[in-house]
Image: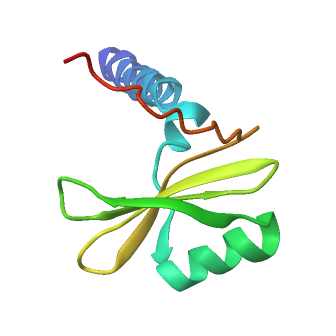
Amino acid sequence: MRRLFYDLFIVAAVLSALVFFLVLISPAQAQQTPLCDERAEIVAVLTDEYGEVPVAMGIANNRGVIEIFTSDESWTIMLTMPNGTTCLVAAGGVWETLPTVKGLGPPA
């Protein structure tokens, strides 16, 4: 009888742990995993399926190349590392390009 109680206790503990970890791994956290592929493949999807074109780029502190692609309805920021791996960093909708204002900068 004691052995049966012990076995049921272990099963309940394992199931409780499983439920706990499933709750911790929510869909929002699962979506935080970056999508990475060859740069050419990602650029093809951005241009062909979303109509996005490159509008800005720069070198990040980790020597990766940051690029921003936009269309009238969406935007994407991607990072290409020196080893050639390209990952999507962020994407969204409702992109608006702001005009450049000359003379605005840090106070002297």
Q: In this rendering, is residue 68 above or below 28?
A: below
The image shows residue 96 at horizontal and vertical percentages of 71, 38
Q: Quadrant of residue 105?
A: top left
In the displayed structure image, the side of residue 20 where residue 41 appears, left or right = right
Visual colour scheme: rainbow
Quarter of the rendering containing residue 99 = top right
* Residue at point 38%, 15% (across, down): 5
Residue 70: x and y, percent?
Answer: 67, 56
Q: Nearer the viewer, residue 9 or 46?
A: 46
Side of 94 where 12 appears, left or right: left
Report the number of numbered marks.
0
Picture layout, residue 98 above or below residue 20: below
- Seen at 42% across and 70% down, the residue is 86
Work out whether residue 90 or residue 56 is closer to the camera in this orientation and state it.
56
> Which residue appears at 45% of the width and 22% of the height?
20
Q: Quadrant of the N terminus?
A: top left
Quadrant placement of the C terminus = top left
Q: Residue at x 41, y 29 (%)?
A: 103
Above or below, 55 against 47 in this view is: above
Residue 26, given in percent of the width and then of the height, sits at: 55, 30
Q: Is residue 22 above or below residue 9?
A: below
Q: Position of residue 80 (x, y in %)?
A: 37, 69
